Amino acid sequence: MKRACLIAQRLVVLGLLAIGAPLASHADPYAAGQPLDDGRIAAVTAAAMRFIPPHSLFETSAAQLALWGLRGLTALDPRLVTRLAGKPGSGRVVMDFSGAQLLVYSAPKQADATGWGRVVAAITRGAWKVSARLRNAATAGILASIFDEMFAHFDPYTRYVPPEQARLDRIARAGRAGPGLDVVERHGVFVVVRLDPRGPAAQAGVRLGDTLLAIDDRSLEHSDVAAVHALLAGPRDSTVVLTVRAPGQHSRTLIVARSSAPPTTVFTRRLGQFLVVRIQGFSNDTASRLSQDLIRAMNGPNPPHGVVLDLRGNRGGVLSSAVDAAAALIGHGVVARTDGRDPAARRILRANGHDLARGLPVAVLVDGNTASAAEVFAAALADNDRAVVIGTDTLGKGLVQTVERMPDGGELFLTWSRILAPRGWPLQDLGVVPQICTSLGPGAITDQLEALRHGTDPMLAAAIAARAARPPLPPLKALALRGPCPAAIGHGGEVAAATALLADIPAYQAALLPPVPTASLR
């Protein structure tokens, strides 16, 4: 199976259900002032209620999802209240308006997604007739509110993405080429905040902090970030004309090629006898670049005595790349597991490589902004006794989503598995509890290093307690386990602590996690 399968995403394209009249190719069915498209509401909600129950992390049903979703009408107009009288399959679904009964429908059976989709659409149609608030929301707003209420019972990453945004997202996932920059909107203008130093935009003269004024002579006034990214993207090797302005300077026009090369994420430098590798994210080539830099350093005239891997601020990226990057230091072993109710969501992610650092001591720097695939990488090295994690508690993003195409062209992102570290503890909400904590002040760092020199690890109890946690982990329990080392933004103290630790092998050995039976890591 290809490594890309490890991302645990599936994209299923459903045929458009024959509900409702066909739409003109240039009409926006969701625009305000358009008639209600209840056929589309029936098709989309039914598809969601059919897909979610067998794939969700927790047990639910089409009936429960429908009743949650109908609260979205109440969110738009509090005078509309839906209730279930009796039980699914034998009871009734009742909608009241201003306290008086408005609509009554037979309740479909618990698992009848198609039937519940029709009920949701029928109730919406009846509510539309009496509520100006629903008519102002239009079909798009109603669908968004239905899914908002439905997914309020799920995690923050389960969501419905409307058709146009989903189209842009699919373009991004398909890897359409771009000039190698990212922008954010600040006070009504678009500012370059990320620039691939090897990318075409940087080579053409774009600089961090530049304001992007126009794309192909099209002014960006009244645009949004999604529209800007869509204009930047295009076929590989095509060109785009960018009008940019540096602070305090005149605007300039640059012709920039589009390239599909992944951004630079690995930056390596020497700090005395140590190799310091900054990993800003996990793109498709992060693992290969890390491997190349390790090989180059180890085969150079002055091999390092230790390796510092800086993951502070790393928000994650491609999971399979993080697995391969871990393999460059672990060699062989379990990197992580994914676990869910759906058998297809259960995987063991294994390292299959060589320790390119040849057993050198390794320190991994993390902070409160270290997330997702970066947490997987840090946890794997710590749990396999290959590194000491230094910093603060990480973000705690350890859920994997699957993607389902909806009949309207939108997409449903559903969390279907949780990521477990090699020793079995969940990354979600808990994050990685470091072995050396840097968020308690410089004095505490000094005290920890001194204790380690004497063979005692002040963070050992907290690190072991966190790794004994098992899912599902109640939020209050996760907060308690994170308490000994509160999440914070990284600072220069992490690098100094890492080099001090790597220079003292007995202290480094004392900071490693106690070993566990090999069988538990298989």
Image (cartoon, rainbow, N blue to C red):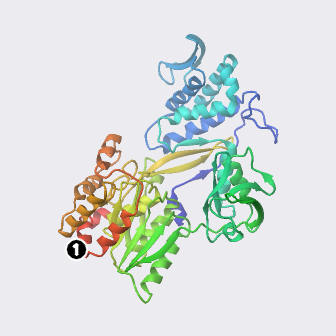
Residue matched to label 1: 506
Quadrant of the rendering where the C terminus is positioned = bottom left
Q: Residues within 10 Å of mark 1 (few under 14, many from 20)?
A: some
The quadrant in which residue 338 appears is bottom left
Extreme residue in the top direction: 100
Residue 312 percent across, percent down from the top left: 44, 61
Residue 168 percent across, percent down from the top left: 68, 51
User: Is 342 rendered above or below residue 264?
Assistant: above
Extreme residue in the bottom direction: 301
Mark 1 secondary-structure assignment: helix
The residue closer to the viewer here, 327 or 483, is 483
Q: Is residue 91 left or right of residue 495?
A: right
Q: Residue at x 47, y 39 (%)?
A: 154
Extreme residue in the front direction: 248
Q: Residue at x 57, y 69 (%)?
A: 264
User: Is 277 rendered above or below residue 346?
Assistant: below
Q: Residue at x 67, y 28 (%)?
A: 137
Can residue 178 be seen here?
Answer: yes
The residue closer to the viewer here, 50 or 499, is 499
Residue 466 percent across, percent down from the top left: 29, 53
